[in-house]
Amino acid sequence: MKFEKVAVVGAGEMGHGIAEVFALAGLPVSLIDVKQDILDRAKSRIADSLKHMASRGRIKPEQVDQVLSRISTYTSIEEGARGADLAIEAVPERIDVKSQVLKGLEATLSPDAVIGTNTSSILISELSQFLSRKNRFLGTHFFNPPVVMKLVEVVKGPETSDATVDAVVELMKSIGKVPVRVKDSVGFIVNRIEGPELLYFCLLVDRGLAKPSEVDAFFRSQGLPMGPYELMDYVGLDVVQELLKYYAAKLSKDYGKCRTIGDLVSKGYLGMKVGRGFYEWEGGKAKIDLSRQTDKVGLLDVMLLEVNEAVKLLEEGVASPDDIETAVKLGLNRPFGPITVAKTLTSSEAREKLEAMSKDFDCEVFAPARSIRDGRLREAIEGRLQPAQPKPESTQPQAPQPAPISGGTAYGDYKNLRVAKVGDRVLRIALNRPKLNLMNVELLEELGAVLDKVKGDPEVFVVLITGEGGTFSAGADLSAYVADVVQFSEFSRVGERTFRKIVELPKITVAEIKGYALGGGLELALSCDIRLATPDATLGFPEVTLGILPGWGGTQRLPRLIGMSRAMELILTGRRISGKEAHEIGLVASLLGQDPDGEALKYAESLATNSAPIAARFAKMLVNKASEVPEDVGLEMESTAFGILFGTQDMKEGVSALLQKRKPNFRGK
């Protein structure tokens, strides 16, 4: 699919900018509108823009006339769109107006041409009903000003062909834009995520909780280029009002609760374009008193509304987490988007705050999305949500099923591991290579990938490592083909690097040892912070009796745990010891009883509940460094960490819980 000529219908704020973008990229453009004076103003604005770019060195001075010469103006679709390979309508957000334009374009263009709509929120399916060639129709949503903003939302309608989407995505890349693929949905990505914010700021003013200038002063102080009310003025209050009306019809009646914007629009106060909205405007700038900031608004409140709506988009399959993040960053000109914010939150934190906001404002739009409500925020933002399964048709009441303590896909699928969040803030990683859970490179790489993922998961405080079946791990899989000494040495390095990740993981790690923990299996356990074992478990290093040595950190970690003499004896003789003896010599912290899996989980849950995660992180680091740095350095590190912890929310919560004689609720903050 080739695009050699472009037609743009609508020479207003967006249309003339889109025409300029394509002309700058070297394509001939037909700019179409109903009156020549509108087109002349648009051409003049394009010329001013190009001259400004030339003065800034973005284009050469001689390119101004070259680019302008590529733009032809027409007052009829039939004349202007003839011969175009791509036509984009950029007329006002009214379906009656857009429908007439789309019909005119389809009647004029060849059957192979593509029609795009610059609608900012109307469903593609709703607009496609006016066309017969729906497979070549899609959303091409540019952002204002199009010449500056990199983002284009490429929206696939229900009947848009993949070839059409692919071709337009490549075209957008070729003209210097960053396209994101979007499934047809009300508001697409950026405007949908902004919807709850618009409603929130409307309700703030409606209820007299804060003045627009006080709110904008607060957001300016947070480093944002514009506050929310200034931005609404800039976009146009009539545009915002139409958006809220559309959302009220398509998403939730709550969007119809906003009164202030409707009042302003009814008075003709449309924002910057008429010189007055929430503010008076002069020379393209709003007159705002920024001397007072409100304390009624928190940045996290607004960010949570964005996170909540982003999760809803993920649940609907509208876009990927990466595309949502990219769209918000580029579309709103920010350094980060809602996915980044969500990575710092737990489901419970988000749920509690959103439920409170929903109640305070009597607004269902603010209520937590299903995945947040169900404790699956992390799965959502990592793109791991599973389609909802249909309920069985049985009419018999179902007995409640206990939550599994292993397996499932809650944290991803792996060939050699079973990984799942279990209990309260615990991640269980079980080696799963029946029947002895021998470790090969593939298993180690999978384990490393899980550790990388859990490192930044605020919903996990403790990682429990064990083996499926009755064995922890009988060691490395030595049956794999090894070409030479270099490859065997690299096998050692892979294990060392993976186990080092466990040592440095900013979470508490617990090894549940049962059956055999031999060689590499014991080294895996040694890399954990705490070891639990059944009394009859078998631990040992048989490597020397096989002509090798412990190659995954065993020669370094074992002496630090039980002393050089005992470590030397175990390594050099290959003698195996029981879990009971391992406990007696301090290798194992505690012994497990008849239900090792259940007891180990209960132990891990207790740690996750009673140990403040930031304090545990620093304590773990200091204990591990104790054997690596001089004592005076270690003490200095300890006092620094102690001071840092004084400023944490968890420290305040721990002291409050002690004084109130209750269980603390640590959040890792």
Image (tube, helix red, strand yellow):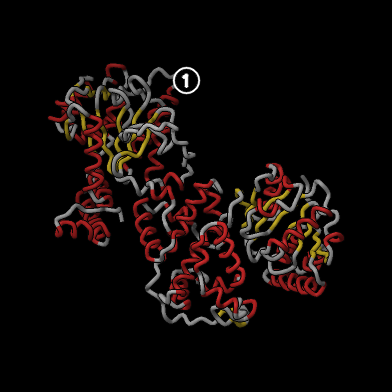
Residue furthest to the front = 395
> Residue visible at 23% across and 34% down?
600
Q: Position of residue 150 (x, y in %)?
A: 63, 59
Q: Nearer the viewer, residue 600 or 334?
A: 600
| Residue 208 at least partly seen | yes
Q: Amino acid at mark 1?
A: Ala
Q: Which residue is mark 1?
A: 483
Left or right placement of residue 370 versus residue 173 in this view: left
On the image, which quarter does residue 641 sit in? bottom left
The reply to whether residue 271 is in sight is no
Q: Quadrant of the C terminus?
A: bottom left
Instruction: Give the vertical position of 520 relative to 379 (above or below).
Output: above
Q: From the viewer's perspective, is 164 left or right of 431?
A: right
Q: Badge 1, how many Cα within 10 Å: few under 14, some, many 20+?
A: few
Q: Residue at x 54, y 58 (%)?
A: 192
Left or right: 204, with 44 as reference point: left
Query: Looking at the image, is 299 positioned above or below residue 271?
Result: above
Which quadrant is home to the N terminus? top right
* 206 and 114: which is toward the camera: 206
Query: What residue is rendered at 18% in x and 22% in y?
Result: 536
Residue 561 sits in quarter: top left
Considering only vertical position in the picture, is 537 above or below 284? Answer: above
- Image location (x, y in percent) of residue 190: 56, 58
Asked which secondary structure carries label 1, the reply is: loop
